[in-house]
Image (cartoon, helix red, strand yellow):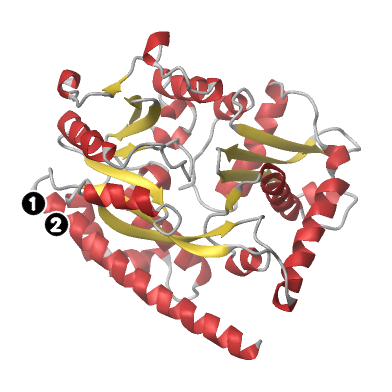
Amino acid sequence: MQGSVGAAPDGISFIDVAQNDQWPPTTPEGVRRYLTQMVEKTPVSLAENAAGVTARVLRVDETVLPVLVSDGRAGKASVLSPFAHHVLYPVHEISRRSKLLGPRALHVILSPLTGLLKVGAIDKAVFVNHWLLSGAPVPDLPPSSWTGVITMLQAEFPSHGLIVQDVKPELAPVYAGALAQAGGISVPTRVVYILDPAKPLTGRKLKKVRHSRGLARRLYAEYSGDLVSTGLGPAEVAQVRRLYRHSNIARHSDLNPKYTEAFFDLAQHCGEFRYHVWQAKERGKIMAFNLQRLDEAFMHWSSFGTDETARERSDRSRSLYELAVAADMVTCEEEGLLLDWGAGAEDFKRFRGAAPHAQVEVVFFNHLGPLRRFAWTVLAQLRRARSRQLERSRKRSKDRSASLG
């Protein structure tokens, strides 16, 4: 699969993660530790439904970009599968909310599209700047660098589409523009909610937001005595994994990443991750956790886990999900970070001051054959039409709310 790295533009190369001198000297220790394990032990060591994915690290001047290469086979987490993300996850969500449209009916309705996407092998892809998480930092690269990066990767992986996920054009217009200039096509994915804790909360209209923020700070302080202050041993790591799977897999979807104990153990040794782990007082057993991923500007990933009996073991009235939300908001306030809160629970997030932002993935497929280009083109057009429809719906809802307020 590998092409000639020697043909890469100056300053762009894959590195041997075991060689100290190949890493940029400014690479944080935690980033290096995390990416080294992902490369050497492969992503499936960190997420069970990442089988068939390999990892490499691309160095572009003094910046490192994780590159995940998928074999295109089914069964992967939605963050590693365009088909799962654009088809399977929506089918799952719609069928959960609808009494008329079950998974079987939806698959029949979508069969022409799914047939095209499968024949077009959209899952055979290389994910650029992918950290095996939902959300990724904006690379600190000159816009002109992206043409060279994409040219090299197309030569290295001629049978794979190239995908840069989690791009927010409103918040990172230079980044989005550079990818477009390099030949990328934007495919709308979802609307995410971004909280800026530094934004002033003055005026009568924001009274409820101020109340929610104050409640979050009090809730976080109230539970501070339950935080585990020492490192997690093997039994605690196993419990964190169990709580994650209960909250994110069993109660939601097995299309979410199935993180392993190795992932949760690795995270506590990388400074870019931050744990909050709360224990039940009566038995000292972990009742909930929240794991955050921070960079210089954003908290762009947070994962919460608990089980059905956790609230019963607590002597307080607020839900443990609200506690995790409070931890996110307080951390961002203290660190001066923006909070990328992801999609879903729109009213809950808006009432706490978060604002909606369109998110896209930028895809490079011009080097592929005609059928595969056609599949991606159709998908992009359908997602754009759906995005415009949702935007009109949100605008009407906002106008109605304004008229009532």
Say whether residue 237 is left or right of residue 297.
right
Say whether residue 334 is left or right of residue 27.
right
Give the quarter of the figure containing the N terminus.
top left
At horizontal 73% and vertical 23% (from top left) the residue drawn is: 231
Q: Mark 1 points at which residue?
A: 370
Q: What residue type is labelled 1?
A: Pro
- Percent across and percent down for residue 248 are 58, 48
Q: Mark 2 points at which residue?
A: 374
- Nearest to the observer: residue 266 or residue 310: 266
In the rendered image of this protein, does residue 104 appear above or below residue 29?
A: below
In the rendered image of this protein, does residue 293 appear above or below residue 381?
A: above
At horizontal 27% and vertical 22% (from top left) the residue drawn is: 13
Q: Are marks 2 and 1 in contact (CB under 8 Å)?
A: yes
- Percent across and percent down for residue 76 are 38, 41
Say whether residue 114 is left or right of residue 91.
left
At horizontal 73% and vertical 75% (from top left) the residue drawn is: 203
Question: Which circle marks residue 391 in the picture?
Answer: none
Q: What residue type is labelled 2?
A: Phe
Cα–Cα span, label 2 and label 1 = 6 Å
In the rendered image of this protein, does residue 92 appear above or below residue 234?
A: below
Dot 1: within a 10 Å radius of its alpha carbon, few (fewer than 14), some, or many (20 or more) residues?
few
For label 1, the SS is helix
Give the quarter of the figure containing the C terminus.
bottom right
